[in-house]
Image (spheres, helix red, strand yellow):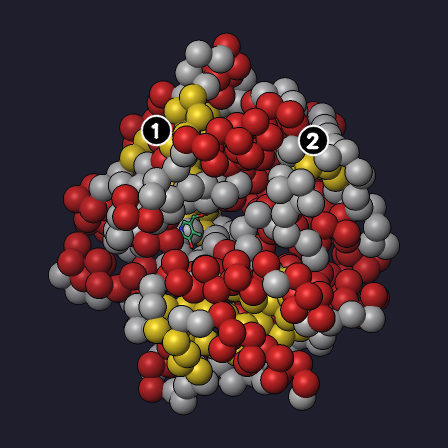
Amino acid sequence: MRYLSTRGNATPRQFCDILLEGLAPDGGLYLPERYPHIDAAALARLRAVHAREGYAALAFEILSLYIADIPAADLRAICEKTYTAEVFGTRAIVPLKKLEDGFYLESLSNGPTLAFKDMAMQLLGHLFEYELARRGQELNILGATSGDTGSAAEYAMRGKQGIRVFMLSPHGRMSPFQQAQMFSLQDANIHNIAIEGVFDDCQDIVKAVSKDLAFKARHHIGTVNSINWARLLAQVVYYFAGYFQATKSGDERVSFTVPSGNFGNVCAGHVARQMGLPVEHLVVATNENDVLNEFFRTGVYRVRAAADTLETSSPSMDISKASNFERFVFDLLGRDGAAVRELFGAQLARQGFFDLSGDARFAQAAERFGFRSGRSTHADRLATIRAVHARSGITIDTHTADGVTVAREHRSGAVPMIVLETALPIKFAETITEALGHPPERPAKFDGIEDLPRRVTVLPADAERVKAVIAAQCAN
Ligand SMILES: *Cc1c(COP(=O)(O)O)cnc(C)c1O
């Protein structure tokens, strides 16, 4: 399997080439040259593998369709090391919880940082360590986080050979739980840098450092952001696992509702559906930052200015643009790289939006690709958290609540609906308390983390100061 860019650069690349890269050189995102097709017999075989050998074996089967440049035995070992009951809490790894008949939650948040990002990031940690050792290289991961991504990356990369993490976060602005999660890590290869500023300042510093090509090359700077294809591929697996748990045979269909920000999670659902997984609808659930809902309703994709990006109680979905969306548009436009380059490279830069409402292919987003969408607000979140708790005794987090709210609007009789749970409620305790009048349950392993010693360096919003910290560590 080879990979190409959504903006048309056709130089074929292998999986391990793009594993350690960010954007393609032409500014596009990488996608496989085609989606391997899973026919009815293959689907039945995957169901049997999942039932008999479990999630790691299913992950190996799906990943090996896309990865030609890691020997099968090595890839299988990486999957088995990643998806263990010890790391993810249960043998099922992603068990379904029933909310009502035909209405399920898929638990994706029992990994080390209690958000679904662990599902992909844990695999990425093992893949990076493997590939860097094979190449005799090292990697310094530089990232910016306002919460979930940073902690997922740090817990995935801690103690890994050949890897250091430098994670920038806005000083004093993450939730106390999220700060404690990150700053209590004592691993020598993890470096927390709290920037005196807001999240955008952190991101600007990452961009400034990445633009210094000489520094970037000398210090082997890389990223783990959500456009990484390996992260997306890891997420494809749990759509299959969810489907197998909700159905008995490949004749049945299911729908998924996915709380969405950067369109990474639901894009993996799109890939699974393109492979032939019998998915009826993929429902995109946004919060008040409804860039994606607007597109699926109107055909207009309009990025928001920083000032128009609202701070909400589902903060991991507070985005101004959806960085993985270009992948879907590439497929929607029949994989026309020149057209994608015109929309994302030219029109967005020039006018901040593009409009496909008059394009006959826009109708295919719903018809051919099964997309639906909806939007949820703070009041919806509170009401849904209360209703789910009252009916089933389950406490859901604020992002998952956006999913449940929107899923209810899109349920249709016979087809089971699976809502992807994207975090555990303890990460967003303040809003849970607002909804229920008491804080959510805290998993035992996080008891007292706020009191642990902290490793964090506070710096002004100055890229040169960050570079100096990186250079000093590399000289060690
Ligand atoms: C990252 C995140 C999301 C959004 O996922 P995307 O892949 O960016 O669409 C939703 N909920 C939580 C809790 C997250 O951490």
Q: Is residue 103 above or below residue 126?
A: above
Query: How busy is the neighbourhood of tag 1: few (under 14 within 10 Å), some, or many (20 plus)?
Result: some
Q: Position of residue 37 (x, y in %)?
A: 72, 28
Q: Is residue 99 left or right of residue 185?
A: left
**Disc 2, SS:** loop
Quarter of the image where one finds residue 224? bottom right
Q: Is residue 288 left or right of residue 213?
A: left
The residue that label 2 is drawn on is: 8
Q: Which of marks 2 and 1 is in front?
A: 2
Amino acid type of the residue tagged 2 in the rendering: Gly
Q: Residue 437, can we see it?
A: yes
Q: In this view, does 450 lie above or below 178?
A: below
Amino acid type of the residue tagged 1 in the rendering: Glu
Quarter of the image where one finds residue 225? bottom right
Q: Is residue 348 left or right of residue 160?
A: left
Query: How busy is the neighbourhood of tag 2: few (under 14 within 10 Å), some, or many (20 plus)?
Result: many
The residue that label 1 is drawn on is: 294
